[in-house]
Every structure is written in structure tokens, then in C-alpha cells.
Amino acid sequence: MSMHAQPTIRAPWPDELARAWKFLASKELFQGEVYPLVALVGEPQRIVAASALQMHTDGEKGRLFLRLRTAFLDKPLASQLLAQIDELAQQKGIQSIGVILAESDPLHSLLLRQGFSSQRTDEWWCIDVPIAKARAGRAAELVNRPKIAAGFSRCRLDKDNLDEALAIAAQHGLIATERLGNREIIGAPSNSGYNPDLSVVVRYQDSIAGVLLVRKIDDTAFVHARAVAKRFMHLSNQINAHFMAHMNEPQYHLLSHILFSAQPTVEKETIALAKRFTGRKIASFSQFVKRSVPPNRQLILVDCSPC
Amino acid sequence: MANRKVLLVGWDGADWKVARPLIESGQMPQMSRVCQHGSYGSLQSLPPYLSPMLWNSMATGKRPHKHGILGFSQVNPLSGKVQPVSSRMRKCPALWNILSSQQINNHVIGWFASHPAEKIRGVCVSESFTRPPQKVGDDWRVPQQSVCPASSAASLAELRVRIEDVDQALLGLFLPHMDQMDLEQDLRWQKIIYRLAELYTAHNAAIQIISEHTDWRCLAVYYHFIDWICHDFMPYRPSVKTASSEQDVRFYGSVVDAAYRVQDALLADLLQHAGSEVTLMVVSDHGFHSDSLRPEKIPDVSAGIANWHRSHGIIAMSGPGIKPAGTISGANVLDVTPTVLHLLDLPIGADMDGRPLVEATLSANPAAKIPSWDTLALDPEATETDVCESEDDALLQQFIDLGYIEMPSNPHEDLVEMTERETAFNLGIDLLDANLPAEALPHLYLAHATAPEAVHYAFHFARALSLLGLREEANNALAVVDDFGDDNLQGQRLRAQIDYLNGDFAAAAAQLGELNNRSDAGSGLLNQQGLLALQQSDFKTAEAMFRQSIDSDADNADAWAGLARALLRRKQFPDAISAARHAISLKRDMPIALLTIGQAQEQLEQVDEAAMAYAQAFQLQPHLANTWNALLRLTPSCSETVQQQIHQLVNAHETTANPPACPKVDAAAIFESARESFAQRLATKRAAMQPVAAYTFSVASEPASSGQEFLIVSGLPRSGTSMLMQILAAGGIEPMTDSLRAPDTSNPEGYFEWEPIKRLAENPNIIEQAGQRAVKVVSALLSHLPRKHAYKVIFMRRNLLEVSRSQQAMLDRSPPNKHQASDITRLSEMLQQHEQQVLEQLRKRTEIDLLEIDYRQTLTQPEQTIRQLQSFVGCGRLTDTASMRTVIKPKLYRQRVES
């Protein structure tokens, strides 16, 4: 391996910006104001690491994207860049940094060395709708399907039941509490809010017992939250049956994929729902947090991977 | 030979690997007859295997660095804009120019980069003529300058095939299980339909021209069909390496074969119309991987899709003047034009890189030569038109001159840089392939320095440095491959190649040694391992490596040349000669293979043959010491005839005792100059810049998600938009205007303009300042209205001849020397095209509610227009009907066209 010249870490020049975004490969996720940094070596200078600290308009939330070449994982450059990101975050008033890593990511050890600790793990499950549809036709599949108990009913997510539905999801920490009361959260079928055709509210007698909050982008549905009201937890299995019945409705047949994100330790029923539709686990991410922070500060989520 | 007719048929991407089994099984009967009665073989392509470069090399007999077509698009040096490559960018005459200069009637249809159609002695139909509209029912006008002479356009246009014209039975040939497919969900069939429409449009044009103009001597027709279909459907064709689902293979697995069968049927049709006395030449620019060499993934680089392209296309010739049952070996895409010229009894240019394939012809005469066709066949008029701006540019300039649009900052800045970089890279690769590394170096450096993270740029730049002896610099250039860590197959292979080129065989062996057990190695690695084994005198291993490489790719010329060297060392001389000859049949400019033949024949005491092989190797690479020494040693023992031939070949060097020295190139100086030039350019660019500490991404909004609605008045400049603003103002809607543009003789009632809206492209949110007021937005800027809002757009339409005259009249009243008088008819055609495009876009945008108002109707039947407007914006907003009526003044209707 050749010697690497002394690295430079700085904000990119305008003519380097397109290369920085390409390097990060996350440009489509950026929104609002972003603070980029690049680490460069060699002559001509090439990017070997890049980061983008993304600030939301309210100035309190943030997210950081970071990518670095494998050869620099154990080099001083990695820690120098993280130190500069720390400094930048503090300048912007953010003092706690979270990191999301894929299960097999070699960056785990780097981040642990830099004072991060593991917080939670989320799994991503994917249902291939045509396959699930084909299997749903098989009689054998029905044997495994829980019976739908009496007393339940299903209805669309609408502005009348929205507050209660969100509160149930918030009980489990599945949506941020500040989103409660947000009336724009339900979008038209093509909008970015929860899709009213794909989302569903399950009632037991007169109360909302469970909710499925689903977004739709192109022909893919994202199950943002599957939640059962705490007092109906004992009926979780039957409520799941209703979610399944809902997901067997025609509007789901037009999709190509359904994605679930769930914490395996606390959202077992969500994962069970994905499994019953022949879902497969496609990824697992761990969130790391560096707690060098005063309380009441927002976390920055970091998407971070070597390349 | 005087009346010979040559029919040159181009099949983009056609490959013997697909065609041969179809021919053998009787599925391509016409091609079968061509091969039986004529000569055929592989046609070597030129890296980087990009069709526009290759088809122009075919049409000129010259490498891309001479003809100037260097990719799919290039930056127009005059306008600084990216444009698709065109006939105007070609720097030397094409076959049709040469023939026309010799008063030979000829036609050309659909050739790559042939737009705008050139004036030739016959009909020239450019590739833009053949592209059908994407959607059923869409307008399909004949693109300007796509047919020359333009008088031929109308009859050809009638024969064009739209997607809706493609017969379902024809589609059935491609999709035999169509009845089982969900054609509403799975829309891949639409690609076939589109390409068929394009194919038949080109073909019908060719047939029409053949039928109408019988006195031609050369007709060249190009079909893109096979290449398009292969890019879309080759992944489904059954192969040991098919990664597609079982269902996709069942539904789409036969599409590629069907494309070849259809193309064969069209070839029969062409021949039927052209007559039996035509000399046919079917060629393809490159092959297409169909077997285990299919790329597993397409690299994320420009033109990465060309990884599907294979180094050998096809050539098949038949008819008068062609040897029957012959094979063609060592042919190159550069040979096409020289061969056609030879068949038509014309000399070839000595500056052409190709040669006539005389071995495939019955001609006893050697090909005649002239120094160059460039001065004889370049049309000076065409060169003058080179400086013209494109139609779009002219239209934009018209708007700028009229004061409706501020000169925009270049929205394609990144695209320009990317295009320049890719053009430099393609040029560098071509120069490297032409064995001109010193010339290639600055271009490859530019590509590398502009995108230093790109491994493929770095590798080829390092290759040029190595070939020039700059070893340390080559190693430094390749530092980027180390960034990806040690477990990096591609990086190690590239490193090994540079180490080998640098002569550091131990380092190369160390790099490759770690890859010995990799299952994903491929033939490139096997060749490298074979070469290293040769260096280490392990000839048995070398032979095994090269044979393994040939097993995986039988057309790999380097593997055959390597095998020949291994066999030579193993004293298997006849086999070595045979392998080396096979290498040359695949890639003729291989001095190493010729040297091997010479050495093997010398061992077999075939002195004449050995000396001739050495002489040919010397001709290709004069500074190879061992060929020179061998020639000095053997020539005295050769027969007199061979001695004469050798003297002809080695020419000026025969009297020197030493081989001619390699031309002195100060490679370090070239490199330094390239670096300095780039550094200076960068410093100049950055002098006026600041690093980007913060960057704002605009959030992609859903259409009309903001809940705000704006009222827009639009239309072409001078279509009556000011009058429309007046009507709205009189009716009760406040106009958004700053009154900066004062009334004048062109618009005595005022312009009702708002200056800041001219910067809508740079600042789309400026529209929000309009609030409930009506704002005038010129048609060219409508596409910049942010989608998050809803709009009611009132678009004024006026007879375009009137608009053109009005624009011209306005320009005539502006200060002199600012512009030149326009061709009114031409201008109105351009305006029509622009207006259609704008209206099409507006109709597609769901957040825009569009009302089209007719100018003449407004002046002649004002009540009707007023009712339309009131209904559109709501009666509550336009209450003063009487006032609206009074501002409509028919006396201001100027430039009226009575029709």
C-alpha cells in the first residue's frame, strides 16, 4: 500500500460539492441546511472521507451522514474528522451524537473507541408483495392465520381518529410526541404523510385497539408504526389478524414491496406480522450514542458506513 | 466494377455468438446465404466501445482522435453548452462526403451522429428522423434538418411507424407467452414496441429511398435495434450466468433472438429492393456479451453500460466482387470505409487508419492511395454552418434580445464538467489504443484530476504514465485503489498490471499471489498470471493460465498471444505459430504475436516466413530491438523476392546498424505541463469562490402541497399577454407589476411586467410575492414554477406568423446592430416547436389549471373571451365586465395574417 499524504479536513469548494455528495451517496436523504466536511489526500486531492451534518429548520434536530474509505478506518484521519464533526455540532448547539450502523459494519469498533455506546437495534423486514400474494392463495397458509374474533372492526385513518391513533403509537415510543396534534400527518394517497388507504385503525367495541401507520412512496409501503393500545395488549394476536386482513385488501396488491422497521426486543408482534406475509429480514441497524452532552438536547442520527 | 453498387448495413451491437446458432438452426436464412456465398468474420472494435465513436470510425476510416466524435455528447466550444454529438462535430469527411465529392450518387440513413443531415449527392436522413414519440398520439413533427434534401422529408414522413402502428402479431414474435403476462403491470413490452417503431421507420426510409432513387452506387443504413434490445433484454436470455428470475427468463428470454430474426428479415427485404447485383456489407460496431462474460453489475460511471459491449462485432460481405465461402480475419471497424472505397474503385486516404479488406474481395489490384480525402471532400459550407447556435439557443437568444429573459447562469454547469471529463477520457483511451501514450497523457490527467476518486480514470492515467516510463508517478496515480482496503480484487489487479508494466514483476506476483484462489478472478486475471509465469520461466503454468483464459473467452486476443509465447518456450513451434496467427486474426496490430511467429518459424528454419513476420512486427513497433536484430540476421539468407518485400516494409531504416531509437518524448515535461495547466485552471476558478460551509437542499414538494394558488398570464413574447393583463386588471384583478418597463410604440398600453419574475429560474420562490395578483410569466420560464403551489395559467395563443412578425418589428425598432433580421418563416417554425413543448408540459402538470385564449378571438369576439376568463378565475374576481370590454382595442391588432 502506498503512503498517504497528510490529509486535509475542510469544507468542500463549490467545485468539489458534487463529488462530496456522490461520495456520501445519501444526497437524496438530505433536506434543509446541511454542513459538509471532506477529508482529502494526495495530489490531485481526492476525497477519502466525507460527512454532512444535517440541520432541521427548527435548529434543534439534526442528523449526520458520514462515510469513509476502508483504508482510513484505523487512521488518525477518522478520529480527526469525528473531532471536527463534534466541534461543528457543538457550534450548532447539538451535543449528543447518535450513530446508526448496519449489523456487520466495521465502524462499530471505531465509534466505540471514540466514546460511543450502543443504544438500540432496529431490524428492517421486507415483504415482496407478488410472492406474498401468490402464497396467500394457498390453503395451507390459511391454517396458520389467526381467526378473526368478534367485536372488532376496521376503519380508515382519518382526522377524527388521528389524535387517538397517534397517541397509541406514541405510548410505545414509535412516533415523537411533538408530532401529536399535527393535522397534516394524513396525506392524500400520493402524498408523503400516512397513506389513508394503506393505514388502518382497528376498533374493539367503541375504542381504538390498534393502529397501522403506513407511508407510501411510489410502489413501496413503509409501515412506520404498528401499535396496540396498552389496555388491549392481551388481544394483540387478534388485532394482528385484522392488520393481516387489511393488508390482504386490493390496495396492497398494487404494491411491489412493504417495508417494516422494528426493534426485535420490543416489537415482536410487528416482526411476526412481517413474517406471516413471507417477509424477510434485509438489514439490521444498531444505534450508537455518544453521551458527552447536557440533558434535554436532541440526538443526531448518523448514517455511517465505510465504502 | 464501374457500376458496382454497395449496400452497407449497420447492426449496432450484433455479435456472432448470438447470430451463429441462429444461422445454424435456420432462423436467420438471409444471413446464412450471405455467409455461404460470401466472406465473413469478426470485426475488431476500438476501446472504449462507444457507439458514436465507433460508427464514425467506420464511416471515416479514422480513429476518434482524428474524426472528433468522442462520446455521446460534447461541449460546444462556442456556446459552452452540452449538445448531443452531431455531424457538425465530425472533423473529417465521412464516406458519403467522399463519394459525393466524386459525383457518386449515394444515400445514408440513420447513421449515428449524422444530424443535422448533410448535403450529399443523394438523400441523407439523420438519426433524429427515426425517433418516434414516446406516447401514443403525441405530435411527431419531422425534426428540422433531419432530411437533406428537405424536399424528400414529406414522402419519408408518411412511411414513419408510430408505436401505435406496431402490430401485436409482431410483438408476439418477441413475447411468445404474451397471453400469460400481466401487460398492465409489467410494461417492459413497451420498450420493444418503441424500438420496433424506430427500426421500421429507419427501414421504411431506406426502402423508399432505394425505390425512388435507383441510380445510387452506395447506400448506408444504420439500425440501432439489436443494441437497444440487448441492453434491455440480454439479462433474461438463458445463459449459465443468467441472474434473472425464472419467470422473466420464460417471458423475455427469447426477445434478443427475435430481434436478430427480425433484423434478418429486414435484410432480405433490403436486398430484394436493392437488387441481386448489389455488393452487401453487414457490419456491427461491437459485440454484446451473451455468455459467462456478462457483467455482473454495471459500474457507476459514465457510459458504464458499455461494459456489456464486447471487443468484436461482425462483418459479412457477399455479392459481386466478394470472395465466396471466405473468412475474414483481422478486420477492424476502421477498415469499413477503405473497403467500400476499394470496392467502388476509389483510392483510400493515406491518413486513414484502416485498410481495405482486399483478401475478402476478388480484386487483383492493390488499393490505390491518395494522401487524404480531407481537403477534397469536406464541404466548406458545412464548416461555415458549424458556428451556428442550435435551434434552442437561437430561440433563447431571441427572448434575451427582446428583453424578456435575463441571461441565465448556466444550469448545466455540472453536466458541462462531466461531459468535458468524459470526452477527455475517451480521447485519452483512443490515443492509448493507438499507441500514443504521450498524446494521451494530458487528456487522461484532466479526467483523473477532475474526478480523482474514480478508479478507472486513475488506472488508465497510471497506464499512460507507465508506458512513458514514469513509474513512480504511475504508482502514485494508483493510490486511489488502496483507499478501498486490502481485500479488494479490482484494486489488486490494477496494481499488479501497473507493477507489471513498470517491470516490477516481483511486486506484480505478490499482488496476484493473493488472488490465486479467488473464484471471481476472470480472464483478465488469468492473462496477468500467465504473463507473470512467462516472466518467471514457468512456461507450463503460463500455458495453463492462457488456456484457461481462452476457455472463458475464446476471442481474447491477448490470451492467444500469450499462449503462443508459452508454446514457443515449450518448443511447440507449429502450435505457437497457429496460436499467434489466431491472436492476429482477432487483433491485427499485435507486434508481440508477429514476433512469436518469426521466432517459431526461425526455429523451424522457415527463413523467408520468419523474416517477413519480423518485418511486419518491426513495421508496427520499430524500436523493438529483437525484431531488428533478427531482420539483420535473417535477411541475407532470404529469397530475393522476400528481401525486396522486407526492404519495402522496413523502408528508411534498412541501412542503419541499430534499430531506430524510440522517438524521444519528454514525458515528465508533458506530465508537469498537464498538472500546471490544471492547477492554474483550478486556482482561477476558485479565486472567486468560498468553501461551502453550509448548503441548503430544497425539499422536494408534492404538487400543490402548499395550499397556495397563483394566477399566471403567459404566452409567447408578442402574443398579446400585455393585453390580457390589462383585461384582468380592468376586470378587478390587481396586476403584479413594477412599471419599470414603460409603454412604447410596440406596447402603447404598457407591458404589465414585473422585473423580478425574470429571475424565476434562479429563485423560484419569487412567485410567492405575487399573492392574489396576476403575474405575467414568459412561456420559457413556466417550467420553473415550483410544483408545491397550484396555478391557474391563462395562456395566450396567437397565429405564430403574426407573433414572428411582431417580434421582428419590435427588434427592428430597437437600437441597430444589436441583432440581424431573422427569417420569419424559420422563426415561426421555431416558435411553434417551443409553444408546443410548453403547452405539452403545462398539460401534464397536475398542479396547473390551464386556459388557452385565442388572440384573434379576443379581438373579434371579446365577450366570448371575457366569459371564458370569468368562468376560469371565478366571476367573483372579475366583476367589471364593461371595463374589460373597453380595454380590448382591435386597432392595436397589428401584423395580422389574413388566412
Image (cartoon, coloured by chain):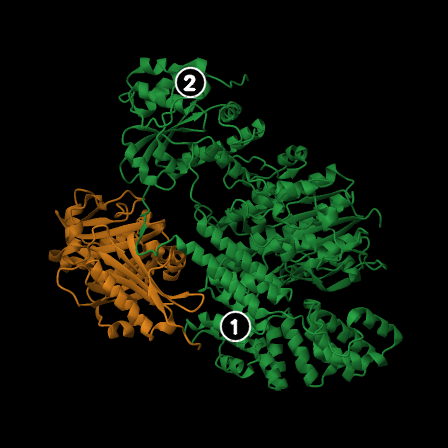
Chain colours: A orange, B green
The amino acid pointed to by label 2 is Thr
Q: Is residue B310 visible?
A: no
**Residue placed most toward the observer, B183 or B473:** B473
Residue B14: image x %, image y %? 63, 57
Q: Is residue B608 above or below residue B368?
A: below
Residue furthest left in the image: A231
Residue B48: image x %, image y %? 58, 61
Local packing at callout 2 (Cα closer than 10 Å; few below 14, some 14-19, many 20+) is many
Q: Is residue B406 above or below residue B175?
A: above
Q: Is residue B147 above or below residue A232?
A: above
Residue A84: image x %, image y %? 27, 66
**Mark 1–mark 2 CB contact (< 8 Å):** no
Secondary structure beneath label 1: helix
Question: What residue would you read off at disc 2?
Answer: B858
**Residue placed most toward the observer, B732 or B80:** B80
As drawn, is B681 to the left or to the right of B273? left
Secondary structure beneath label 2: helix
Question: What residue would you read off at disc 1?
Answer: B474
Residue B705: image x %, image y %? 29, 40
The amino acid pointed to by label 1 is Ala
Identify the residue shown where x is 60% and y is 41%: B129
